[in-house]
Image (spheres, rainbow, N blue to C red):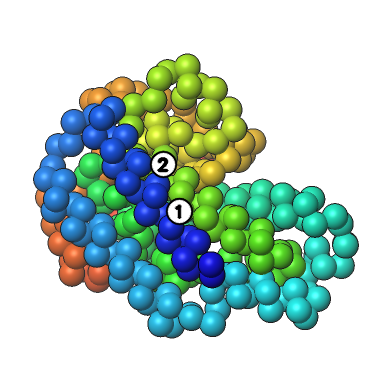
Amino acid sequence: MDEASIRLSIFITLLVLLTLGQQLFPRRKPLHSTPKRWLTNFSIVIIDSLLVRGLLGVLLPVLVAQWSTEQQWGLFNLLSLPDVITVILCVVLLDGLIYWQHRLFHNRPTLWRLHRVHHYDKDYDLSTALRFHPFEILLSVLIKNLAIIILGAPALAVLIFESLLSGMALFNHANLKLPLKLDIMLRRFIVTPDMHRVHHSIYNNEMHRNFGFNLSIWDRWFNSYVAQPKDGHKQMMIGQPESQQLPTNNLFWLMWPALKQPIQHKTKTD
Ligand SMILES: [Zn+2]
Ligand SMILES: [Zn+2]
């Protein structure tokens, strides 16, 4: 199986399981029409995939990793550590990079306009994980490729990381009620749905916190961790303060007019 088939199989299996999970054990009642949101969010991920394949087809991260290994470029190609250590370190370091990239997208006004498309969703379920503006996806692939070359990350590490990232994003955006004890145990290590939901709050001091996607350590280490939303998970408002007046489920509006919306609040995280 090639990279695309492996990633697609993991993605579809998780999509089916988590859709079932959030139907059976929902955390919150959706406030808006789910079919409309899903149509928008799934359309965005299709546009993203076509664009990345079309524009960056030869620059896909696993191919970049293979190429930089052949060239013997990057830190880990110089260090010659055992393969298993290299793979684990690269997966963890790439996760740290995604944490800081996410913080940067909240901190810089131009980047925030792109990333705000993700935060404009007025409900929170696994389809929210698919909702990233194509320009943000393109930028993020380029940043990741640069990191892969600098690290000299092997293709296996990149494949594991990419599969983990898309799988974990679906999991931690799911409208899924986990038993409290399980949530407490899991979030010592990984980002749970309750932990990431805080990040989708309309409040400034909650939306600019909990940036992690896979490991929860980064938010604790770098002082951006908030355990629970102040209004509780069932009552908290999701989205942006101005979302209610905006056509946030209109695909065409999200692609361009949304980027020109004024920024209503400070974007600094500290
Ligand atoms: Zn964010
Ligand atoms: Zn999110």
Q: So how many labels did they put on this image? A: 2
Please report the residue visible at 54 percent of the width from the left and 70 percent of the height from the top: 2
SS label for mark 1: helix
Q: Is residue 98 visible?
A: yes
Q: CA distance from mark 1 to mark 2?
A: 12 Å
Q: Position of residue 99 (x, y in %)?
A: 55, 49
Please indicate whether residue 51 sits to the left or right of residue 139 in the image. Answer: left
Quadrant location of residue 134? bottom left
Type of amino acid under label 1: Ile
- Decide if residue 207 is in sight here: no
* In the rendered image, the vertical position of residue 176 relative to residue 5, given as above or below: above
Residue at image mark 1: 10
- Tell me the tag on residue 113: none
The residue identified by callout 2 is 171
Residue drawn at x 88%, y 62% as measured from the top left: 80
x 60%, y 55%: residue: 160
* Label 1 neighbour load within 10 Å: few <14, some 14-19, many 20+: some
Q: Nearer the viewer, residue 106 or 145?
A: 145
